[in-house]
Structures are given as C-alpha cells and as structure tokens.
Amino acid sequence: MKLAIICAMEEELAAIEAAVSLNLVAKLDKASNNYAEYKFGEHTIILVVSGIGKVNAAVTTQILIDNFAPDAIVNVGVAGSLTRDLVFGDVVIATDLVEHDFDITAFGVPLGQIARMDTFSFAADAKLNELLHSVSLLNHQVVLGRIVSGDQFIDDEQKALFLRNEFKALACEMEGAAIAHVCYLNKVPFAVVRSLSDMAGQDGQGIHSFNELKEMAAGRAALVVKNLMEKL
Ligand code: ADE
C-alpha cells in the first residue's frame, strides 16, 4: 500500500519520525515543500509538511495525488478541543469535516456549505477510521467525531461554543477539511487524526496551551498513526 501522511507543521512530522523507523528512498521538492518517500516493510509511506492553513494543505494534497498516486492520505497533527469532555492529548479521528469559515449564508445556504457542491461535509474513509480507532493510548481517549477547519486559530470561548453548536464538532484546526475536500474531488480515501493541544480558548486555554503542549499532543497523534501503519 502507498500511504501519504500530511502534517501542517514540522513539530507534527518530527513526532512521527521519532515514533516510526523509516527508510528514505526518494525526495521531491515542489511548490516550496519537500515530499519524502520511505519504505516501511512492504509499504510505501510519503511524508510531507504542508504549511499551515487551507490553501497550503490543498496545494500539498493535489501535488501528492498527481505525483505519487497514493492509495490513501492521512492528515496527522494537533487541534483545539471544542468540548470539555476531551482534554489535552486526547485524540479525535474525524468522521467527517467541514470548512467552518466558508460563508455564503447571504444566499440562504448553511454556514460551511461549499458553493455548488453535492455534499455538506467530507466523510473520512470508514476502513481507515476503523484501523485508526483500534489503538489504545495510556491515559488518553481516542474518539470519532466531526472536525471543523478554517483559516483561524480559535482562541475564544464564545467562538469555540459557536463552532460546537453550529457544526456538532469535537475539534477545530486549520487544514483537515481542505485535505478532505481535495481527496473528495480526486476520489482518494482519506482520514484525519488530531490530538488536542488546547481548548480553543475555553477556560482561557488557547494559544498558551498550544505553545506549551503541541509537541506532547503531536506525539499522541503520531502513536495513533504508527498503530495504523503497523496494521496496514
Ligand atoms: N490547531 C491547534 N489548536 C488550534 C486552534 N485552537 N484553532 C485552530 N487550529 C488549531
């Protein structure tokens, strides 16, 4: 199997490199990013850091698909929690994703609906999710639920509450739905795995927690993807 893994930040990729031992076979530089191809047993794994935000994530996903034809794409990293039931280091595996900042409500369309698309949310691959969910993490929950993405770091209790109520989402981040959108257009199976680095501003825990805990959370997400790779 050929599996591509996209991280938005170097810290997230470093956590995967620390968790899994991989043999580099090739590299590709394109659009300011580096795509590294590895052998992992009989499988091929491609790792790339996309950069932050939906456009960076979308460009990287399309380049991956065009140049490597992966069987599946997994986005791995950290996110803000939208519920007090989930805390730092807990993991959300996306059932589906919505671009929360896509706003054509002026036309009477629900917030998050992409103009003239035949779906409201982008559903992750059920088989990948089953494998991802088969992990158990010491002292941390691993749950399935909706993730929302937008070009905003959420550090505001009211905004976090709004996203939770509007979208029934468990976590927010800045790339997953864009990767899901590109995979949907290309009919490539995908999954999104995010460990919680902050509370998106709930109880005052936003940017400070992110800065303090992003490496810890990236480590938890890396363990979940490691488990997936071992079960391929
Ligand atoms: N990634 C990690 N925490 C986040 C937050 N609070 N908002 C957006 N993206 C994030």
Image (tube, grey):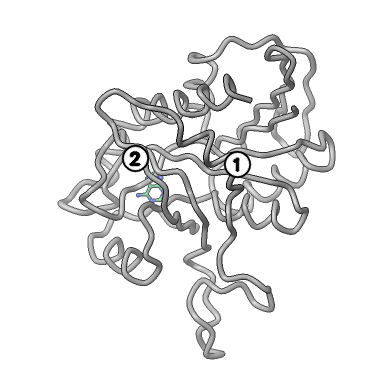
Residue found at x 44% / y 40%: 194
Mark 1 highlights which residue?
A: 127
Foreground label between 1 and 2: 1
Residue found at x 36% / y 37%: 142
Is the C terminus in the top left, top right, bottom left or bottom right quadrant?
Answer: top right
Instruction: Find numbered disc 1 in the image and state the secondary structure of the residue it sits on.
Output: helix
**Is the C-beta of the residue carrying label 1 under 8 Å from the nearest atom of ligand 1?**
no
In screen coordinates, is 164 left or right of 105? Answer: left
User: Given the image, on which type of amino acid does mark 1 rest?
Assistant: Lys
* Looking at the image, residue 40 lies above or below residue 206: above
**Is the C-beta of the residue carrying label 2 under 8 Å from the nearest atom of ligand 1?**
yes
* Looking at the image, residue 43 lies above or below residue 169: above
How far separated are the C-alphas under marks 1 and 2?
A: 23 Å
Residue found at x 44% / y 50%: 173
Say which quarter of the image contains residue 219. top left
Between 39 and 50, the one nearer to me in the picture: 39
Is the N terminus in the top left, top right, bottom left or bottom right quadrant?
Answer: top right
Q: Residue 24 carries which label?
A: none
In screen coordinates, is 118 left or right of 158? Answer: right
User: Given the image, on which type of amino acid does mark 2 rest?
Assistant: Leu
Residue found at x 74% / y 15%: 42
Q: Residue 196 carries which label?
A: 2
